[in-house]
Amino acid sequence: MQPTQKRNRIKNRSSNLSADIIIKYPLSTEKCIRQTEYENKLAFVVAQKATKADVKKAVEQLFKVKVIKVNMQNSFSGEKKALVKLSPAHLASDVSADLGLI
């Protein structure tokens, strides 16, 4: 297999999950709320098979915002968490207020 073929196969791995299945629920811990207020970030628990691209597309689709960056983390309890940084044009505190977190 050519290296470019292998790279293309890896790039096309995004799952065909819907936005409702990708985003399970938002996190509302003290640290997450602080990041929402000061760093313009939102935290979600996401599906195990979700990729960064899937989460970015799902958040943009569900909340009508522009996502700059997505960081993923697997917890010891088996949950997959996503930290989503929004563009300065969209405030994470507004989105979290719509979700009822603040």
Image: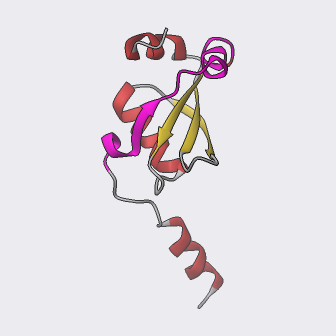
Instruction: Report the residue at 47% width, 66% height from top.
Output: 13
Quarter of image, res 59 = top left
> What is the chief secondary structure element of the magenta stretch?
helix
Instruction: Report the residue at 47% width, 16% height from top.
Output: 96
In this view of the protein, which residue sits in the foreground, 34 or 64? 34
> Looking at the picture, how far across and down is residue 26, in whole percent?
47, 28
In this rendering, the answer to whether 86 lies above or below 45 is above
In this rendering, the answer to whether 90 lies above or below 5 is above
Report if residue 61 lies within the magenta region: no
In this view of the protein, which residue sits in the foreground, 23 or 28? 28
In this view of the protein, which residue sits in the foreground, 47 or 61? 47
Magenta-colored span? 18-38
In this view, the residue farthest toward the front is 77
- Quarter of the image for the N terminus: give it: bottom right
In this view, the residue farthest toward the bottom is 1
Q: Is residue 70 left or right of residue 60?
A: right
Instruction: Report the residue at 47% width, 67% height from top.
Output: 12
Report if residue 32 lies within the magenta region: yes
> Looking at the picture, how far across and down is residue 34, in whole percent?
66, 15
**Is residue 49 visible to the viewer in this orientation of the structure?**
yes
> Looking at the picture, how far across and down is residue 94, in whole percent?
47, 11
